[in-house]
Image (spheres, rainbow, N blue to C red):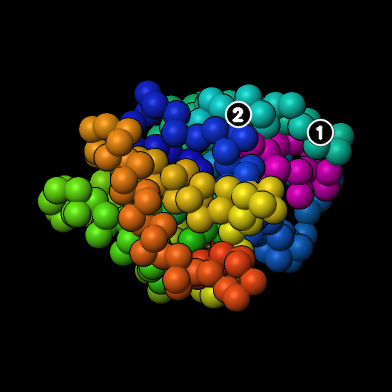
Amino acid sequence: MGQIQNPVKDYWSTETYATAVPFAPHLADTLVQSIEFDRTDRVLDIGCGDGKFTTSFAPSVNYVLGVDSSPSMINTAKTLEYGGAATDFRVVDCRHLEEDAEVMNGNWDKVTSNAAFHWILKDPSTRISKLENIFQSMKPGGTFFFEMCGHGNAPEKVTAFMFALVNQGVPIETAEAMCPWFYPSDVYMKNILESVGFQVKKIELYTKKQELKTFENGGGGLEGFMRLIGAQMLDILDSEERKNSAIEQICRMLRYGTTREDGSQWITHVGLRCIAVKP
């Protein structure tokens, strides 16, 4: 999650998100298990979404502030249980952390993010300043750990969206400009993190096949997944009929390559996980 291109429109629905990408809160499970938490820790969770990822570490810390651009997600996050940790959740444009005084107060022992930075860091004009703000907000010795989609993530998805939009008469340059995802390499992320002052302790790309639960199995299937994560790109089209036509074409293009013999649907997920510290 994280920032969206149009800050007025909330593209996220808690219910749709839970159905289409139920695996998202668990993408950073391995990373979280490698972090040493302290009961006194104050943690900033950037792009916290519906709070389900926050529950994976909140019982081990003292306080969590979760920020996200989606009012729908924040409203849900406020309803969950966090194992006794004090929590606060608020709507914040995660590209501009400097606009929230508490975020920038410099008292964070840890800063984290899961499945959000590939949205938040898309805007190159705020990418470095965003990381600089994180660095400034942390205590010396603090840990910054995050997981996001990395270079090579779901290339079939990106290609299908581009083709379908061009087929609808959208210039390829416009489709590229509206692409909401940023999938960096580990080399690039290491370089920019070190340029703002972080010491990168671990950074890696990994690849796995990720199942998209079908409607029959309680999920949103390929169509639900593509509608949710591609909502901003589909907004280029001026009618629901054209959007539905594009989705139908996207799913038809992907069906053969994503469907296994048993009917289950899978995409190629490339994740980037990182642990860095502020000296």
Q: Residues within 10 Å of mark 1 (few under 14, many from 20)?
A: some
The x, y position of residue 208, in whole percent, is 58, 73
Identify which residue, 184 or 125, lies in the foreground: 184
Picture residue at 19% right of the left edge, 54% below the top:
167
Q: Where is 65 relative to 199, above or below?
A: above
> Mark 2 highlights which residue?
74
Q: Position of residue 44 (x, y in %)?
A: 62, 41
**Circle 2: residue type:** Ile
Note whether 133 is above or below 35 in the view shown: above
Which quadrant holds residue 11?
A: top left
The answer to whether 248 appears left or right of 139 in the picture is left
Left or right of residue 51: residue 90: left
Residue 253: where, in percent of width, then height? 36, 64
Q: Is residue 148 visible?
A: yes
Q: Quick check: 64 above or below 154?
A: above
Residue nearest the observer in this picture, 111 or 23: 23
* Residue in the picture at 41% in, 57% down: 251
Q: Tell me, for residue 81, which label it has, or none.
A: 1
Query: For mark 2, does the 10 Å Cα neighbourhood hold few (<14), some (14 to 19), or many (20 or more) residues?
Result: many
Instruction: Determine if the magenta segment contains residue 221.
Output: no
Tell me which amino acid carries mark 1.
Answer: Glu
Q: Which badge, 2 or 1, is on the more N-terminal residue?
A: 2
Residue drawn at (49%, 69%) of the image: 258
- The stretch in magenta equals 48-65
Which element carries disc 2, helix, strand or loop? helix
Structural distance between the alpha carbons of marks 2 and 1? 14 Å
Q: Quadrant of the C terminus?
A: bottom right
Residue 21 seen in this snapshot: no
Q: Please identify the residue farthest to the right as the structure is shown.
A: 84
Residue in view at x 35 percent, y 42 percent: 244
* Left or right: 237, with 9 as reference point: left
